[in-house]
Image (spheres, grey):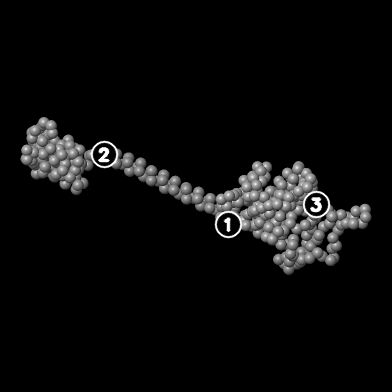
Amino acid sequence: MEDAYTHKDLAALCSVSETTIKSYRRKFPGFIPVLTRGKPIRFRKEAGEVCLKIRDCFEKGMSVNETLAELGKHFTPRTGAAPSPSPSPARSQQVVSPEYLDKFFETAGKMMQGMAALATAQAKAGQRLEKVEAVLDKLLEIEARNGERFNELLTKVGSPSPDIPPTASSSGDGAPSRETVRARKIVNVRGSEGEVRSYALEKEADKATGGLEQPPGSLLSTPIVIRNDQDEFLGVPGRLPLSGFVEILVREAEEDGASLSRWERAGEAWVFVMDLTGGGSHALYFTATTTPRGNQVALLERLDVDGKETTPQFLQEFFRQVKDKV
């Protein structure tokens, strides 16, 4: 039947799916005339023009009522079809009530205010966090700077005063006792009014180090770290400083029978040596370095046992055992 269309034919004519053609029939009954109701259902020739018109109206963004009115201008619905309504402005305005719109905009406004308040709170929290981090960084910087200045004051300012001789307690044979020898340095400080005051800095010899040179305070107060196999810096919880790490070593060594511990220099490294009572020794090499994030740290880069350098794996296990005692 050349003058009849199936759902498939109408879909191909309008370049839409068969489901879309079926939806046209449900929305606009009577405007798409049926020729036969067998299978498949066949439609009259004018059904093609109606479907094309419906498609064009929907592509223009027209509603179902507007499309229905447009179809009434060009086509006559069959018997039983719904009459072509003439939508009035009053009816269009009553689709959504004013009360509903007021409620909707009120709710939307509250949601927008809440989102704005949340964004403001998040921004303020971020600013506070940045300020706290800046203050902490400043405190760490001041602490390191004060340690360096105090160390320079002890080692570089002035020389032993000839007017104030070092005091010493003598043993039975007249020899001075090493544990009580004190070195004094006189430091002159000029006040804001021009007056000059002299201070005597004393440092008693330490039994554990025999009065030998020690690392600067800036290094002793620096957090201790080690490098793993991936060349990453690993520290101790709480940012344990080098001085605290050494205290743990000394305490454990004394329990194991260590007789003496001391600091030595090896190029740029500071070496902490522990001699054991039964023979043998441990030597730990520390250097000052900076992490990729810009933090100053004391790096444990080497461990010698009885004069022989251990493997990186042995060093990492040793570091882990000491860290577990914190």
Quadrant of the snapshot with the C terminus: top right
Query: Residue drawn at (68%, 54%), measured in percent from left and top?
Result: 285
Q: Nearer the viewer, residue 9 or 278?
A: 278
Q: Looking at the picture, which amino acid does disc 1 mark? A: Gly
Whole-angstrom CA distance, mark 1 to mark 2, is 64 Å
Q: Looking at the picture, which amino acid does disc 3 mark? A: Lys
Estimate how packed mark 3 is, as few (under 14), some (14 to 19) or many (20 or more) residues with alpha carbons within 10 Å: some
Query: Residue drawn at (66%, 56%), measured in percent from left and top?
Result: 287
- What residue sits right under mark 1 in the picture? 294
Q: Earlier in the sequence, mark 2 or mark 3?
A: 2
Q: Position of residue 324 (x, y in %)?
A: 65, 42
Q: Earlier in the sequence, mark 1 or mark 2?
A: 2
Query: Residue drawn at (72%, 52%), measured in percent from left and top?
Result: 307
> Can you name the residue that lies furthest to the top here?
38
Give SS at disc 3: loop
Q: Position of residue 7 (x, y in %)?
A: 15, 38
Give SS at disc 2: loop
Whole-angstrom CA distance, mark 2 to mark 3, is 93 Å
Estimate how packed mark 1 is, as few (under 14), some (14 to 19) or many (20 or more) residues with alpha carbons within 10 Å: few
- What residue sits right under mark 2 in the picture? 97
- Tell me if I can see residue 119 in this picture: yes
Query: Residue drawn at (76%, 42%), measured in percent from left and top?
Result: 255
User: Contact, CB < 8 Å: mark 2 with mark 3?
Assistant: no
- Tell me if I can see residue 217 in this picture: no
Q: Position of residue 320 (x, y in %)?
A: 64, 45
User: Contact, CB < 8 Å: mark 1 with mark 2?
Assistant: no
